[in-house]
Amino acid sequence: MPRIGHSMTEGTLVAWRVEPGARVRAGEVVLVIETDKAEVEVESPADGVLAPPRVSPSEVAPVGAVLGWVLGPGDSAPAAGAAGPTSPAAAAAVPGATAGPEATPRRVRASPRARRLAQERGLDLTRLAGTGPDGLVTETDVERAAQEPAGAPDLFAGRRVAERRRLEPLRRTSARRTTEAWTHVPHIVQMIDVEVTQLEALRREWKRAGGPRAGITLNDAIVKAAALALAERPELNAAVDGDELVRFAEVNAGIAVETPRGLVVPVVPRADGLTLLELSLERRRLAEKARAGGLAPAEIGTSTFTVSNLGGFGIRAGTPVLNPPEAVLVFVGAAEDRAVVRDGALAIRPLVTLSIAYDHRVADGAHAARATARIRELLEEPAPLLAGLEPSA
């Protein structure tokens, strides 16, 4: 199981693309894994024959676990639990595999028939004792469990449980990382109202004109504004590593995208150096790939700040949780007409509330407030955001 991103600790095997016994060539895709961020194709590191796999689809394995073997002439796959192949020519299926107890996949071993039957009968395989080789759960084990009389009801916190379901990789990682962030990173959240009259007028003009600019969104402008603000204040484009403050060389924007698998954060590198149109086009490309589950490893996991937008659900403000090691997260609320006072008179203007979370170890309140105010300034007077955006673009 390869490591895709510094935070990855385990992966789920989605599918084998090659049948056992088939010949494969180095660089040929042999399997697909799912990480906490995306589905990733894994290539064979060598020419040979694919042995029967060690890990089946839907099973979870830790980083470094052996998923299968590619065998050379005269080689045979090692027995379960063996340290390696029977000859040096038998290459590990993925780079980064390690021997030792920590490389043993943490999973329920069950035959395909047993898995299908357990799903049909609504049985949890983790609660069954396998009688097959090496504790394998067999079809007979599932049949026996299905015929046993129901015992005491499953309770949690004093309430009857309707169903237990293992969290999907994205949900598991999100639960772990938000818990770590909430426990170990001292948050401050600043909320600020931003008038977007000029930006909304520009967007209407671009939509009427058509062309690539018609797809530029308010969220694109917010990403650009945040990137410029952090570029101007490099002490915030940073993270804490022990007793050290680590400043990043680039301002990489993470953009939260809702997908059928959960929330994914693809990354736009060097967002401060892109024109608004270039940023918008890249954001659209990455969002499509994220929803299709096709993000490459280089397109995730390297953001230095994140923008998350729930305005489409009518949410005005929130208290976002940072995504470590990032020190800044911009939560975007709904763009809506509100009553405001301008020049002593009541007026109606389009406003957006930004709720910006900062790592208090990186920025105190005053440093954060300067960045927050700069983001508002760029959005209300957007000329710097439009640099390089020709009228005929």
Image (cartoon, rainbow, N blue to C red):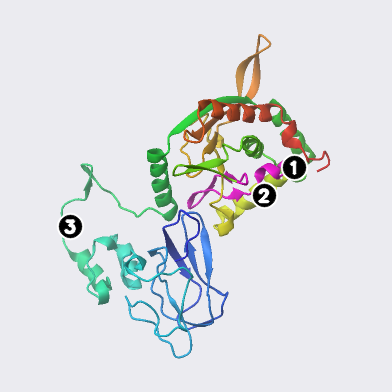
The residues tagged by marks 1 and 3 sit, at their Cα atoms, a distance apart of 62 Å
Residue 294 in view of the camera: no
Q: Is residue 377 above or below residue 7?
A: above
* Residue visible at 55% across and 41% down in the picture: 238
Relative image position of residue 53 (x, y in whole percent) = 41, 75
- The residue lying toward the viewer, choosing from 207 and 271, is 271
Relative image position of residue 195 (x, y in whole percent) = 64, 24
* Residue visible at 77% across and 42% down in the picture: 210
Q: Is residue 272 magenta?
A: yes
Q: Name the residue under label 3.
A: 150
Sooner in the amino-acid sequence: mark 2 or mark 1: 1
Q: Give the range drawn in magenta.
A: 249-276
Q: Is residue 112 magenta?
A: no
Q: Name the residue under label 1.
A: 213
Verify CB contact (< 8 Å) between mark 1 and mark 3: no
The residues tagged by marks 2 and 1 sit, at their Cα atoms, a distance apart of 13 Å
- Tell which tag, 2 or 3, sits nearer the viewer: 2
Dot 1 amino acid type: Arg
Question: Residue lying farthest top?
Answer: 344
Which numbered dot is residue 25? none
Dot 3 amino acid type: Ala
Question: Residue lying farthest bottom?
Answer: 74
The residues tagged by marks 2 and 3 sit, at their Cα atoms, a distance apart of 55 Å
Instruction: Locate the N terminus by quadrant.
Output: bottom left
Q: Mark 2 points at which residue?
A: 282
Relative image position of residue 229 (x, y in whole percent) = 64, 34
Q: Is residue 249 above or below residue 77?
A: above
- The residue lying toward the viewer, choosing from 302 and 390, is 302
Dot 2 amino acid type: Glu
Q: Is residue 171 above or below residue 234?
A: below
